[in-house]
Amino acid sequence: MVKKALFLAAIILVALMFFGCAKTYTIRTTDGKEYVSQGAPDLTNDRFIRFETTAGRKVLIKQDEISSIQEN
């Protein structure tokens, strides 16, 4: 019985690692707006950051308008 429970717990943990652990980031702008991105924002452009919100909206913001980016 204990082995079965441990095996089930291990399977659940592995499933969460693959399906339930998408990182989100809170992005705040200098004018007070706040966004929650699904996954890490794209910082490859020198002038803009690009990300998709948890609601599926694609956002492009000038980097100088960002006050903070924090991993949740």
Image (tube, grey):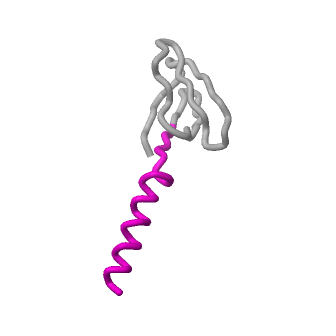
Q: Magenta segment, principal secondary structure?
A: helix
Residue at the image point whose x is 48% and y is 28% from the top: 67
Expressed as whole percent of the image width and height from the top left, the position of residue 40 reads 47, 34
Expressed as whole percent of the image width and height from the top left, the position of residue 61 reads 58, 22
Residue at the image point whose x is 36% and y is 73% from the top: 7
Q: Quadrant of the N terminus?
A: bottom left
Q: Which residues are magenta?
A: 1-26
Q: Quadrant of residue 30?
A: top right
Q: How many marks?
A: 0
Residue at the image point whose x is 61% and y is 23% from the top: 60
Q: Find out whether residue 42 is within the magenta segment.
A: no
Q: Is residue 55 left or right of residue 44?
A: right
24 or 17: which is nearer to us? 17
Q: Find out whether residue 8 is within the magenta segment.
A: yes
Whether residue 72 is situated above or below residue 53 in the rendered picture: below
13 or 46: which is nearer to us? 13
Q: Is residue 24 left or right of residue 3?
A: right
Residue at the image point whose x is 41% and y is 73% from the top: 8
Q: Is residue 4 left or right of residue 31?
A: left
Expressed as whole percent of the image width and height from the top left, the position of residue 13 reads 40, 62
31 or 44: which is nearer to us? 44
Residue found at the very far top of the displayed protein: 46
Residue found at the very far bottom of the displayed protein: 1
Expressed as whole percent of the image width and height from the top left, the position of residue 4 reads 37, 80
